[in-house]
Image (cartoon, rainbow, N blue to C red):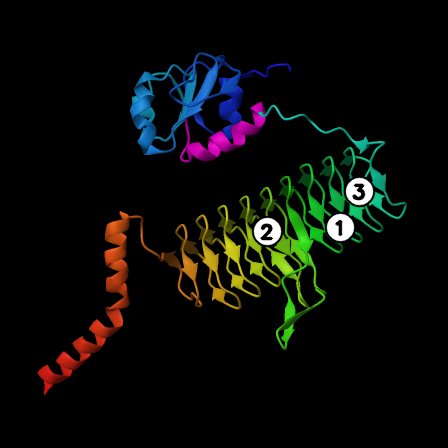
Amino acid sequence: MTQKSYRLGEIAKALGAELRGDPETLVSGLATLQVAGPGQLSFLANPTYAKHLGDTRAAAVIVSPAAAADCPTSALILDNPYLGYAHLSHWFDPAPVAQPGIHPSAVVDARATIAASACIGPGAVIEADVVIGEQVVIGPGCVIGARTRIGAGSVFRPRVTLAHDVVIGQRCHILSGAVIGSDGFGFASERGEWHRIAQLGRVILGDDVEVGANTTIDRGALDDTVIGNGVKLDNLIQIAHNVRIGDHSAMAAMVGIAGSTRIGSHCVFGGAAGVAGHLEITDQVHLTGMTLVTGDIREPGVYSSGTSADTNRQWRKNAVRFRQLDTLARRIKELEKKSEG
């Protein structure tokens, strides 16, 4: 693999950064402040790591204006160093570049429409009436169900499964093992027995959506499950049928959203947060890790539930006191009434 090198001057221009240092300095990779050496670029975004800035051996560091004076080497000054690093990371990405074409081992229905610039990997299955846009990459072992439509520039890592009638926007990135459009968990009960309900809706993903490895998004029972533009879903997330998620929301691993819940735009859910079904959550809501939501949230802000870890002995004591809270509240009300009398 040929190593890529770039001059600091062209990097600064591309990022819109102020450069303090030699624009001819060559950069051939990225590394943390602690391990970066000559020829590598680093960044300082989290103040926790500022203690390593003075000792770094990096060729240059992306820093904020406030930290620029403490940088002992060349500096690329940006208001948001982490964003600069994010953009620059793609310059040094060693992932193989997909080539247009359909692998001989892929199974492609004659009624599928595939752009000439798309790449269909080994062992992929493309069913009838699928439409695949320009520069789409379908990785090895993917299954694309009938009548699914995939927008330009979307990438599917190996073993992604899309069920029938799924709609994927442009520039989406779906990681390995994700299942989109699987049947929602819908059953009718009679005399102790469960009867399966056919799931008639679709899944619709907007543009620039990322779906993590082994995440599942269920199709709607009647209405569609809809994921807005720019939504980012981590690994091992479950999105149930008829859920709607607003633009640019993000969810960390193991979040679970029950059916028919509506989530606003620019929400952030920490790992293992859970949301019950048929709820409304407004825009700009942040759930900290392992928060359980059982009612509507109508005001933006940060929400938490549960208790943090403690010794088992102390936790057991607190658990007993929690069970006594209702009794204590009643006693306080009785005392207030007596004092008022």
Tag 2 residue: 229
Q: Quadrant of the C terminus?
A: bottom left
* Residue 129, percent from left and from top: 84, 51
Determine the CA span between mark 3 and mark 1.
Answer: 14 Å
Q: Nearer the viewer, mark 2 or mark 1?
A: 1
What amino acid type should be assigned to the residue bearing mark 1? Arg
Task: Count how many numbered circles sit on residues in the image.
Answer: 3
First in sequence: mark 3 or mark 1? Answer: 3
First in sequence: mark 2 or mark 3? Answer: 3
* Residue 241, percent from left and from top: 62, 62
> What residue is shown at x 76% (from left), y 46% (from top)?
144
- Give the number of the disc on residue 74: none
The kind of secondary structure element at disc 3 is: strand
What amino acid type should be assigned to the residue bearing mark 2? Asn
Q: Quadrant of residue 323?
A: bottom left
Question: Is 65 included in the stretch rendered in magenta?
Answer: no
The kind of secondary structure element at disc 1 is: strand
Q: Nearer the viewer, mark 3 or mark 1?
A: 3
User: Which residues are drawn in magenta?
Assistant: 76-92
Residue occupying the far right of the picture: 110
Asked if residue 52 is positioned above or below residue 231 in the image, the reply reads: above
Left or right: 2 in relation to 42: right
Q: Quadrant of residue 153?
A: top right
- Give the number of the disc on residue 125: 3
* Residue 55, percent from left and from top: 32, 17
Determine the CA span between mark 2 and mark 1.
Answer: 16 Å
Could you classify mark 1 by the number of other residues whose Cα lies within 10 Å: few (under 14), some (14-19), or many (20 or more)? many
* Residue 84, percent from left and from top: 47, 31
Nearest the viewer among 183 and 173 is: 183
Tag 1 residue: 149
